[in-house]
Amino acid sequence: MDKVYSHARAALPELIKDGVTIMAGGFGLCGIPETLIEAVRESGAKDLTFISNNAGIDGVGLGRLLETRQIRKMISSYVGENKLFAQQYLSGELELEFNPQGTLAERIRAGGAGIPAFYTKTGVGTLIAEGKEVREFNGEMYVMERGLFADLALVHAWKGDAEGNLVYRKTARNFNPMMATAAKITIAEVEHLVQVGEIDPDCIHTPGIFVKRIVHMPNPQKRIEQRTTRKNPEAAIPAGAGEEI
């Protein structure tokens, strides 16, 4: 079966429908499947539920889908960099299921492993635990969290082959690998597409059995979420200052 598609739009048509649940990998703007997200925008599908650590920033990543009001619900752990996300949530336009970041990661991992639920100390005695089962184990209280499993997972990999074996780089490994296991269909956009057998088996992060479709994205734009630089100490010195007369 040929898993490689010519472009993102070709890989999505029959999979994107109103009301589906989609996982989107990445952390901040690092490792996000930006090309696939844009294809979702172009599809026009609405009432979508997205599982993602955050929603990008205004005008980038999932922020593009917030602009078009295609997302009905977010299951996330962080919203601080996206003003539109906060505005839609506070106005009641967007439903939000907030998770501690580690809990979100474990819910996704559990979903991919076929584990329906697990217990964690995180959130006990807070708003996070409201309406959830709380049990005592060895004298400590734990809240039950359910595993997450989506209709579709969109991931971004640094390298991949035609069988769907994937390698991620650095921060992009935060959510992409676990999301690739936790959906009915996983689509990967890949920066470097190589021949089968070129990737050292010991270096594969996601085995190809989890990946159904691949899109080659050779030159993705690498965006910086918050550019922070040090001031040039020389620039702060007025012209002529310190010179002897």
Image (cartoon, rainbow, N blue to C red):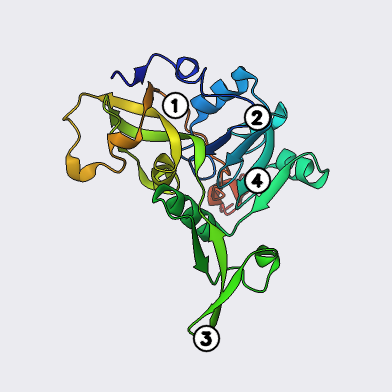
* Disc 1: which residue: 220
| Image coordinates for residue 102, horizontal then vertical, percent | 51, 60
Residue type, numbered disc 2? Leu
| Image coordinates for residue 54, horizontal then vertical, percent | 59, 45
Is tag 1's residue or tag 4's residue first in the polypeptide sequence?
Answer: 4
* Disc 2: which residue: 65
Marks 3 and 2, Cα distance to the nearest angstrom? Answer: 45 Å
* Disc 3: which residue: 139
- Helix, strand or loop at mark 2: helix
Q: Would you say residue 37 is visible in this rendering?
A: yes
Q: Is there CB contact under 8 Å for labels 1 and 4?
A: no
Q: Is there CB contact under 8 Å for labels 3 and 1?
A: no
Dot 4 alpha-carbon crowd within 10 angstroms: few under 14, some 14 to 19, many 20 or more: some
* Disc 4: which residue: 81
In the picture, the disc for residue 78 is none
Dot 2 alpha-carbon crowd within 10 angstroms: few under 14, some 14 to 19, many 20 or more: many
Instruction: Examine the rendered structure and indicate whether residue 106 appears above or below residue 112.
Output: below
* Residue 3 placement, left or right of 14: left
Marks 3 and 1, Cα distance to the nearest angstrom? Answer: 51 Å
Residue type, numbered disc 3? Gly
